[in-house]
Structure formats: C-alpha cells, structure tokens
Image (cartoon, rainbow, N blue to C red):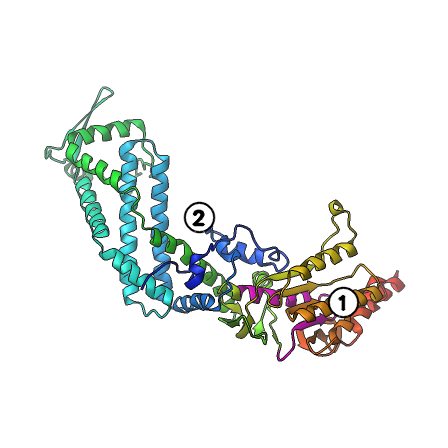
Amino acid sequence: MTFTSILFAGTEAGKIHEALEAPAFFADLNLDQVMDTITAGRQEYNLKPFFYASLRDADAIEYRYEIMADLENKILFEQLTSFAEKMRAMRRYLALVDKLYYRYHKEGWLIEAVDMYCEAVNSLVRDLALADLKSRGFLAFREYISDYARTGDFAALLAETKQLKADLGAVKYCLLIKNGSIKVRKYESETDYSVDVEETFAKFKQGAVQDYRVKLPAGSGMNHIEAQILDFVAQLYPDLFAKLDEFCGKNGNYLDPAIATFDREIQFYIGYLEHIARFKQAGLKFCCPEVSNTAKEIYVDEGFDLALANKLLAENSSVVCNDFYLEGKERIFVVSGPNQGGKTTFARTFGQLHYLASIGCPVPGRAAKLFLFDRLFTHFEKEEDIKNLRGKLQDDLVRIHDILEQATPDSIIIMNEIFTSTTLKDAVLLGKKIMERISELDLLCVCVTFIEELASLGEKTVSLVSTVVPENPAFRTYKIIRRPADGLAHAMAIAEKYRLTYGSIKERIRS
C-alpha cells in the first residue's frame, strides 16, 4: 500500500490541489465567513487553498468521508491533536534556529527540533497501531509511517539524537569569576556547599520571611557573554562539540516530506470537525451525504445555513432547519414569500450544502443526497458600480448572460432577487426567458423572486414558499415549504414600498 496524501486519492492525487483564490460565489453564500472561522488560529498551515478547491470525483469525496468517520473516534482525534502540537513546537524551534545568531545556540535548538520530531513520529506510530482504522487514507498512512519509523535512517537519527542530548546534558564545567573576568574549566568534583549553607542558616529562620531570591526570566535568547562561555566549554570538550557540528551538518533536512504533508493536511479535517462540534452540542445534525455526478434527484433533511447558525448560536438564538427535495424531472426551486422570511437563507443553504459536499465535508442535516456539480454560479443583488457605466438592470442582464454562457447541464445556478429594478411586466418577461434557458440546460437552480409567475413554468419547476404564523402574518416562521405561490408576496412588497401596509397607514394616521 502506498501513501500520497490524506486529502487526495486516486486521480485527484496527481493534480494541483490548491486554489489560490476563493471561488467567486464564496461571498454570496457566506462561505468566506465559514472558512475564516474554521481556519482562524491555523494560519501557519495555509488551509484556505484546500477549502477553495472542490472535487469532481465521487470516489475522492468518499475518500475524505471515510477519514471523517475514523476521526469520530475521540481518542484518535486527541492523539492527532497531540501530534500536531508536537509538530508545532518543532516548527517553533526551527524558527529560532533561523533567528538566532550564535553558532552553538542555533545547533542546540536544532537538536531540540529533531528530538521533538522523533518523539512526534514515534508517538503517532504507537497510537495508530492501536487505532481501529477503516479509511483507505489512514490505513495507507499507518503503513507508511510504520515502515518509515523502522527504516535505518530514522532509527539512526533517533539513536544519535538521544545519545547526543544525553552527552551534552552530562557536561559539567566551572566558572571562575573575578574582577570582571571569567575563566571556564572542567568540573573537578568540587564539593557543593549549597546544602550545608542552607542547613546552617535554617536555624535562624523565624516564621515567614520575604523571599529575596531573584527570578530570572525564562527565554530562548543568549547574550554575548553566555555565548563566549559556551565557546569556551566547546574548547574543553572538542570531540563532543565536533559531533554536534557533524550532526547539524548532515541533518538539516531531517523532516520527511510525506509526514510534513500529513501534518498540514490533517488540519483540514481537525479544523472542520472542531468547528461543527459546537453545533452538534446544540443538537444540530450533520451527515456525510450521498453524492452523485449523474443523478439530479436530491434531498436534504433538516438542513441549515452554517454561517447564519454560527451567528445565531453566539446570540443564544435558535436555528431553524428546512427539508427539501427534487424528484423525477424536477430541477428548479422557485422560492417566493414575504420579505425577511428566510428565502435568501434557503438559497445560501442550498449552495453551501452542495459546496461542502464537493470538498468532502459533512454537511448540515440529518440525511442528504446531493449533486456533484462542475461549476457553481450565484447571482445576488449588487449595488450599482459607477465604474462600469451600466445601470442596475443592464448589469443584471450582463451578469446573467455571462453565467448562462458558461453553465453546463452539470452546473448549479443560484439567483437571488433578480430584476427588482424594472417593472413587473418586464421582470416577468425577462425572468421567463432566463428560466426557459435554464430549463433547456437541465441544470439545478434556485431562484428567489417576487415574480411568482416563474413558479409554475413547467414540470421542472418547484414552487417553495416562506411561511408566516397564520394567526399573525407579521411573524415569520423561516420555514420553507413546497406549495403553490399564493400571490401575496409581490402585493406585500408593493405595499411596503409605498408604505401602504397596515402598520405604515396606522403610523401616518397617528401623526
């Protein structure tokens, strides 16, 4: 069994895996917020490029889900976290080597880095040997690191590091300080009188007394006097320090590339699982969905917007979950209903779930089956940009035209509030033209709109409506259900626009 990557399998392993920039739709779907939260505190790993690169191979996604399942083992998760902490300490030591000035000081921190690396590898070998692993990725890595730890090169590195540290730790020397000068010589078994002095003066101690001992700050630095003393010690023990020089000279590139890659890539899983753990504690569900790049019959039970849920939990507010499905020839959700009723949130949820599935991450929901798209496009309302010299309607049309030119039957399009800047008649006409083109492409689409005529264009279209509390229509439930559009959403929008709602009229009467 060979090991290449804990993130990429099969044909994906031979490709360029890291996207340098976030996909264009990230901001519209609030996925930028999600990834910022996940990667916070992990900047040293540069994880965002992994979250920017979706996969097109269902087996490559399953490869990640297998690893996610293994990481549900809390003991294994803690062991990998411990491994990461050791490797992080090793990198801190290496960073000191680059920053420090004095030769033996640098070499001392290098041997500490090597020692920490050997400890991290050996600990992980022992932990993985006892773990009940099922995933292809972990099984391959366990075999790789076990073989690596048994190689002569690593065994020699470990033995030499331990012996050299022991020899350096056994060095003893004396300092003779007089009239501003310092002499260094070997320790000659002089008697240590410190214990006798303490016992002599102990009888004069009466009750609690102030401790006048000076606590020297602990640090990694070394001043020029300490460096000079260390140089003198090296002259006293030339053979030992020659071994130190030789060790550092030949072990500058001790870090195994595959283990270094694993150390970085495993943080993709750890970061995401740590992020969703707080949602699980709040009772929200996550699942590893079934994914397909052929079947467009999809469903999600109890899905929710991950970015919004993060905000709501911070405010101790409840999170509303929604179910949805497409079956047979159904391809397009047309979502209508009153303002602030959760329509845009639903559209974001649809996009988030499909994208998270495409990178092999568990998705919000009790159960799900999702489509593995080739490209995901979003068209959300934007403010006019005076630089492009286009009006809002023209800008909407140009952007949608560009999307339809690039989209394929395997794409997903999410449109939110299109053509709000024109008349209802023109919006209906333009909306129908666009929906006809989307229907011809047979791609998956979510369209949030006040144009309720779009909800009944054909067998590929499904009407979803955001609901309100029946007894009090002013209160939103944030539930999105399958039902025909009732014609009230646009009327309410017009009433709100011209301040003709019950509340607005009542306010004007009072004034």
Q: Which residue is mark 2?
A: 44
Image quarter where the C terminus lies is: bottom right
> Which residue is located at x 69 percent, y 70 percent?
440
Q: Which mark is residue 433?
A: 1
**Which residues make up the magenta segment?**
327-356
> Which residue is located at x 55 percent, y 58 percent?
34
Label 2 sits on what residue type? Glu
Label 1 sits on what residue type? Lys
Q: Is residue 437 left or right of residue 221?
A: right
Residue 425: image location, x then y, percent: 84, 66
Residue 84: image location, x then y, percent: 37, 54
Callout 2: helix, strand or loop?
helix
Which is more toward the observer, 218 or 368? 368
Q: Is residue 406 left or right of residue 236?
A: right
Q: Earlier in the sequence, mark 2 or mark 1?
A: 2
Q: Nearer the viewer, mark 2 or mark 1?
A: 1
